[in-house]
Structure formats: C-alpha cells, structure tokens
Image (tube, grey):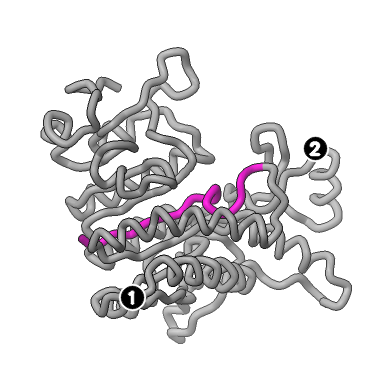
Amino acid sequence: MRIVAALGGNALLQRGEHPDATIQAVHIHQAATTLAELALAGHELVITHGNGPQIGLLALESAADPALAAPYPLDVLGAQTQGMIGTLLVRELRNKLPDRDVVALVTHTRVDPADPAFQHPTKFIGQGYTEFQAVTLIRERGWTMAPDRDDWRRVVPSPRPQAVLEASTVRALVAAGTVVVCAGGGGIPVTLNPNTGLLHGSEAVVDKDRTAALLAEQLDADALLILTDVTHVFAHYGTGHAHPLPAATPAELRALDLPEGSMRPKAEAAATFVEGTGGIAGIGPLDDALGILLGTTGTLVRTDEPALRQGTARAGAPAAVRV
C-alpha cells in the first residue's frame, strides 16, 4: 500500500515549548518510531510535515537581524524549514530503517496568485504573544495578528495548493523503494507566470494537510494518514455530548462543527482525498499510525463507510455512529 503520512505540528513542538533543536529532536525520534512501523509492515511511505513554529521563529529572527536590509521572504524561510526538519527526520528514519533509502526532498507547491487567501491571512505561524505585544508587532513590523486561544499569533496568507511540482520525482523515488520526506510546511509556495512560464516565490504558507491530500492524489496513494495529538475526530466537539468517531464518510466529516484553526482543515483534507480517489484516509494519534490504518484507533474515512462500521471498525465501537 502506498501511504502519505502528514505529521502535525505536535510532532515537532508542543504548545508552550521552547523551539530548541534538542526538544524537536526528541519529538522527531518519537514520530520516526511510529512511521518506521508503516515501512516495516511493507508499505510505501511518503512523509509530509508542518512548519508553523519553525517558520515563525525564522521570520522573527530575520525581521530582527540588523545585518539585513529587509527580512527574508516566507517562501525562502519555508525552504529553510524543509531542510532543517527534513534532516532530523531522515536521520531518525535511517537509524530505524537501516535497509531502506530515506531522502528529504525540497519541494514547491504552485498556488494561484489571485487566490483570495492573499487578502485574508488565516495561517498561524510562530509563537504566542500577549495582546500588548501583538499590537506592538502590528505597529513596528506591519504583521497581521489574530487571537489563538489565550494568545495572539501572527497570521499569514494560506492559498490553496494547485500542484506539487516535484510529484513525478517523488513517485519515482517511492517506486524505487525510497522513503521520501517532502512537501514540508505545505511546500514552498510559488506562482507561475502564464506569459513567461517563470516561477516566482510567494509570501505565504500553504496548509500542510491540504498539500498532503493533493500530493497523495498526485501519487495515486492508497491512503492518507493525518497524524496529530488526538485519538479521534469527535462529533459534537466542545459540548457535553462529544464522542469519538471510529469511522465516517466524507459527507459526515464535512457536516461536523469542527474548530477552524485545528481539526477542520484535517477533516477537509481527508474528505477531499477520499472523494477524489476512492482511497481511505485516517486521522488519529501520532504514536499509533499503524493502528489508524488497521482501524484500532483514530477515525477512518472512506466512501464505503457503512461496511467499515460492520467490519473493520475498532473493537468496542458501536455498529453505527450518528453525528
């Protein structure tokens, strides 16, 4: 089975942690353990990852560097995070898969320069600030800031991905038995000039779950796994009637009232992949990727979901789940 596994931000840094390299290395060691299980089970594996905390840190450092006439653009900083996170993942995966080739590939994601997202920034990056600090950053650096739970954080445009430009290269590597780390941070956003055919970097950060779903479709993957810090998608989230969903159809997933800044993009990515390919998608805990695939944890999304409920849904789950 060909699998695209998307690592959530918690795979690298958890909320409130210092963005130190040593802390991220510990989390990536844990992530590599569960990812290696998929490869050892005989599956072809492509790994994507988020970069919100890392690109935010680099943007902050770049903006404060007195040696620079202007901060580095987000597309270039995104490339830096691909290399930084990619090398940590590759080293850990090579240690756990000594008989497999593992490579990190810098990839670009084409976006539409007319995407309305450029006028309405929504993608959180970087650390949290107090409201006073946020107002100061708006005034001094021209950043757009928005509340995120108890903090304020920088938000940047997040246009929809149209294509991962290196998908054919990834396909060839996977077919040769290589474990590939790519499309980090949703890929380096670029636009294509229709008149000249030239690519240009874009001041944005693409949603990594949407890019993972698109890449999985481009690769003819059988499954998309979105690994995060929750055991399941929950129906009636945030209420006294919340309950986990062991399985769902794309339509059921889209009908849920899920948080826009966290679970909603993951649910939409899973639904989009299943609708577009007829494959399966899973959303569940980072430490049990194989369990999500087997239906023992997480939420499995597929078009023939009623059959799933009667067959492969996790033990103890009700025969039917109403949402």
Asked if one can make out residue 52 in the rendered structure from this viewpoint, the answer is yes
Of marks 2 and 1, the one in the foreground: 1
Q: Residues within 10 Å of mark 1 (few under 14, many from 20)?
A: few
Residue 8 located within the stretch drawn in magenta: yes
Q: Position of residue 60 (x, y in %)?
A: 76, 61
Please give the residue where the numbered disc 2 appears in the rendered image. Answer: 131
Query: Does 312 appear above or below 55?
Result: above
Q: Residues within 10 Å of mark 2 (few under 14, many from 20)?
A: some
Looking at the rendering, which quadrant does residue 204 occupy?
bottom right
Residue plotted at (42% across, 28% down): 257
**Quadrant placement of the C terminus:** top left
Separation of marks 2 and 1 at Cα, in angstroms = 51 Å
Residue type at numbered disc 1: Asp
Tell me, for residue 99, which label it has, or none.
Answer: 1
Using residue 155 as the reference point, say whether residue 199 is left or right of it. Answer: left
Query: Does 253 appear above or below 138?
Result: above
Residue plotted at (64% across, 60% down): 54
Residue type at numbered disc 2: Glu
First in sequence: mark 2 or mark 1? 1
Asked if one can make out residue 144 in the rendered structure from this viewpoint, the answer is no
For this rendering, which residue is in front, 301 or 132?
A: 301
> Which residues make up the magenta segment?
1-15
Q: Disc 2 on helix, strand or loop?
A: helix
**Quadrant placement of the N terminus:** bottom left
Residue plotted at (17% across, 51% down): 278
Residue plotted at (54% across, 78% down): 200
Query: Does 22 appear above or below 179?
Result: above
Q: Position of residue 43 (x, y in %)?
A: 25, 62
Looking at the rendering, which quadrant does residue 166 occupy?
bottom left
Using residue 171 as the reference point, say whether residue 180 is left or right of it. Answer: right
